[in-house]
Amino acid sequence: MRDKLLKILIDGEKRIIGQSRYVSSAVFIGIVRIEEKEFIILEKRALHIRQGGEISFPGGKYDVEDKTTEYTAIRETIEELGVTRDKIEMLGKFGSLVSPNGIILEVYVGYINIQNIEEVKYNSAEVEKVILVPLDFFLENPPRVEMIGMENIPMFSTSELKLPERYGNSWTGRPREVYFYNYQGEIIWGLTAEIIYEFIQKYR
């Protein structure tokens, strides 16, 4: 019994319970250095795809053929931004974000070593445009903070399961903060803004 318990506790510090029910994705915080100034490279998603018109990091869904989520982040960055592998300098993993909508985002950080934005030949089927935001912008401008509520809607019979009647109706979860950055009229929000906010707090 003890041996079995010890075995399942291996990697317990890293384990995310219920991970198999989530969609695994990876994104890349790509830092671009141009003329001694550092930028975070973001992309505005093409209108006809999922979450079209929103601003995000390069990245996407983990594929079963990917060796690791780091590989996913690099592969998606190459596909979306049209940069070659030798331009990507991976520094490491920043962390994992478990979102309320069923996604686990593995976040990586590194450099995209280009001299100017013209070297980015982005995939117009997925990307409307590329946005370079100075790192200083996020350091000097805190995000606008709003709250979003969560609602749980039961899709089961409480009477059949002999649960308290109160669970037969919807109930609210704990509200959470949502961050918004406005850069030159472009709104960066949602998971992207949440990652940026956490990254900037650690970067300071």
Image: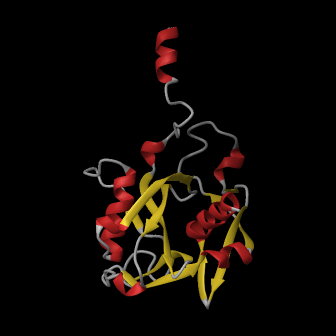
| Residue furthest out toward the front | 36
| Residue furthest out toward the left | 65
Give the x, y percent position of residue 166.
72, 48
Q: Nearer the viewer, residue 114 or 102?
A: 114
Question: Looking at the image, can residue 61 be seen?
Answer: no
Q: How is the image coloured?
A: secondary structure
Residue under the point 31% across and 62% down: 75
- For residue 74, what is the image quadrant? bottom left
Q: How many numbered marks have been drawn onto this rendered protein structure? A: 0
Residue under the point 30% across and 55% down: 63
Give the x, y percent position of residue 71.
34, 54
Give the x, y percent position of residue 172.
71, 57
Relative side of 128 to 187, left or right:
left
Q: Nearer the viewer, residue 173 or 176?
A: 176
| Residue furthest out toward the top | 1
Question: Looking at the image, can residue 13 be seen?
Answer: yes
Residue under the point 28% across and 50% down: 64
Check the image and report above or below for 75 versus 40: above
Relative side of 43 to 88, left or right:
right
- For residue 201, what is the image quadrant? bottom right
Check the image and report above or below for 16 versus 200: above
- For residue 173, what is the image quadrant? bottom right
Check the image and report above or below for 117 versus 173: below
Instruction: Please state, as top left, top right, bottom left or bottom right, where the C terminus lies in the image.
Output: bottom right
Q: Nearer the viewer, residue 159 or 26?
A: 26
Give the x, y percent position of residue 109.
50, 60
Residue under the point 74% across and 72% down: 146
